[in-house]
């Protein structure tokens, strides 16, 4: 170990087995003697005092350790942060070449980029950093400097949700959100509003799925349920859908959706309503839509409420079938990370049986490649997008 490394506090695991995951729960470690502030960089050893790795410690959080490196000679400092951010950006610009298609993409995807507790999204000249760990919050100046080296002149906005700050024991006093900005996606214009309460400003994770659905929906009557900013409906109309209706409960986000449609000179009928009530009324009228998107917000963060979330997914998908004619398309999505792909597909199986309909699963997709998933962190593959044909 380096001299710097040897001076770090040491956390001992209760087992001599190397963790198979970068998250280590509080029950898996011996409580250290003395107080180690949340977010401190520590060395981790196993029950036989063998070096395991180095990462962030937080004795107040459920995730007590976030392992960042298994190299005993590697210091977790501003240089390390800059190197990881550089690696993440080169992936997106050189390999994925995202700048050809959009100026709205995920710059850093937490564990997927080896930066546990940090998400960064780009919206034109705005960079939005969302913090999930006290350790990353402590490195916020280094993160800012590293990002500006790649995006000179960019405006930065950092925040953390209140429940995260409470769990992780840090105080992120967010600055005033930047003004909304126009972004481009596959030749279409959209409105991103960082800090407006809708994720980090725009749902870039569905970018490829929006385009794919639009290709399938040419000539069809489209229904975009839980439409948010109207991305699916706008893409569909731009690709030749016959007509499109978008439904969401949030009046504010529907104003943005209408702005997005107008910016692309497209006609979409956006309606404010609860989708359960709206679908029941539409079915009672005999309305049919032969290309339906169902993309609700995350339904739970609590492992004890996964069953309730699946019941709600069942109910909304079952109602959606009542407005889809034979041969119609259904794109049904879940961004609830605690709901596995297997459980989501099982829910669809039960929906088909209950409705007496045949659901053909054409493809199961996830977030775009700018949301990479580490093989040992399957939880970060949160998005399920199931393309179906309904008979």
Image (cartoon, rainbow, N blue to C red):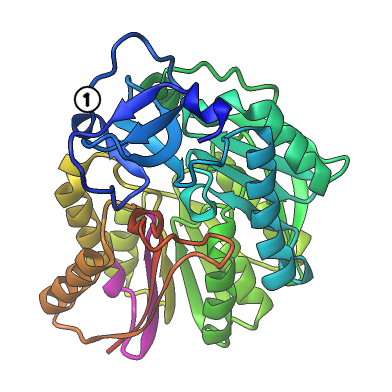
Horizontal placement of 56 versus 234: left or right? left
Q: Is residue 114 above or below residue 207?
A: above
Q: How many marks?
A: 1
Residue pictured at 60% horizontal, 35% vertical = 196
Q: Position of residue 59 (x, y in %)?
A: 32, 21
- Taking the image as shown, residue 281 lies to the left or right of residue 246, namely left
In this picture, is 249 found above or below 235? Answer: above
Residues 141 and 34: in front is: 34
Which residue is nearer to you in this view: 348 or 326? Answer: 348
> Helix, strand, or loop for circle 1?
loop
Residue 97 seen from this side:
no
* Residue 215, horizontal then vertical, whole percent: 58, 84
**Is 118 drawn above or below residue 315 in the view shown?**
above
> Is residue 317 left or right of 219 when viewed as pictured?
left
Is 260 positioned to the left or the right of 132 in the image? right
Do we see residue 29 in this rendering? yes
Crowding around mark 1 (Cα neighbors within 10 Å: few <14, some 14 to 19, many 20+) is few
Query: At which x and y percent is residue 350?
Result: 13, 72
Give percent across and percent down for residue 208: 57, 72
In depth, the one of 103 and 270 nearer the eye is 103
The residue identified by callout 1 is 30
Residue found 28% across the figure and 74% down from its top: 321
Quadrant of the snapshot with the C terminus: bottom left
| Highlighted range, magenta | 320-335
User: Quick one: 148 or 65, which is closer to the camera?
Assistant: 65
Q: Quadrant of residue 168?
A: top left
Does the magenta run of residues contain 167?
no
View extreme (top): residue: 34
């Amino acid at each position: 170990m380096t001299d710097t490394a040897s001076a770090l506090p040491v956390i001992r695991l209760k087992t001599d087995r190397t963790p198979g995951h970068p998250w280590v729960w509080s029950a898996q470690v011996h409580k250290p003697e003395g107080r180690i502030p949340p977010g401190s960089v520590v060395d981790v050893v196993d029950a036989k005092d063998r070096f395991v790795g180095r990462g962030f410690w937080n004795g107040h959080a459920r995730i007590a350790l976030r392992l960042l490196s298994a190299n005993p000679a590697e210091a977790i400092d501003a240089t390390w942060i800059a190197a990881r951010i550089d690696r993440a950006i080169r992936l997106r610009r050189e390999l994925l070449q995202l700048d050809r298609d959009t100026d709205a993409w995920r710059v850093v995807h937490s564990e997927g980029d080896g930066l546990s507790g940090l998400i960064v999204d780009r919206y034109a000249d705005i960079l939005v950093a969302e913090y999930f760990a006290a350790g990353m919050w402590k490195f916020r100046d280094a993160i800012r400097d590293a990002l500006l080296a790649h995006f000179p002149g960019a405006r930065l906005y950092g925040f953390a949700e209140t429940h995260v700050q409470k769990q992780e024991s840090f105080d992120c006093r967010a600055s005033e959100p930047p003004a909304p900005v126009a972004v481009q996606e596959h030749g279409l214009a959209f409105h991103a509003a960082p800090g407006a309460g809708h994720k980090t400003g725009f749902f870039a994770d569905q970018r490829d799925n929006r385009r794919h659905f639009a290709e399938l929906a040419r000539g069809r009557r489209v229904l975009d349920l839980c439409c948010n900013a109207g991305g699916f409906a706008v893409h569909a109309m731009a690709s030749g859908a016959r007509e499109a209706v978008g439904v969401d409960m949030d009046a504010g986000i529907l104003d943005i959706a209408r702005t997005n449609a107008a910016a692309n000179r497209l006609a979409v009928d956006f309606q404010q309503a609860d989708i359960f009530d709206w679908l029941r009324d539409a079915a009672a009228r005999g309305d049919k839509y032969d290309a339906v998107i169902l993309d609700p917000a995350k339904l739970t963060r609590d492992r004890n409420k996964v069953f309730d979330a699946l019941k709600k997914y069942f109910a909304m998908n079952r109602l959606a079938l009542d407005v889809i004619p034979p041969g119609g398309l259904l794109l049904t999505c879940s961004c609830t990370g605690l709901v596995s792909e297997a459980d989501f597909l099982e829910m669809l199986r039960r929906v088909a049986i209950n409705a007496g309909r045949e659901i053909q699963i054409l493809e199961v997709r996830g977030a775009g490649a700018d949301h990479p998933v580490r093989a040992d962190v399957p939880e970060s593959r949160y998005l399920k997008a199931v393309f179906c044909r309904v008979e």
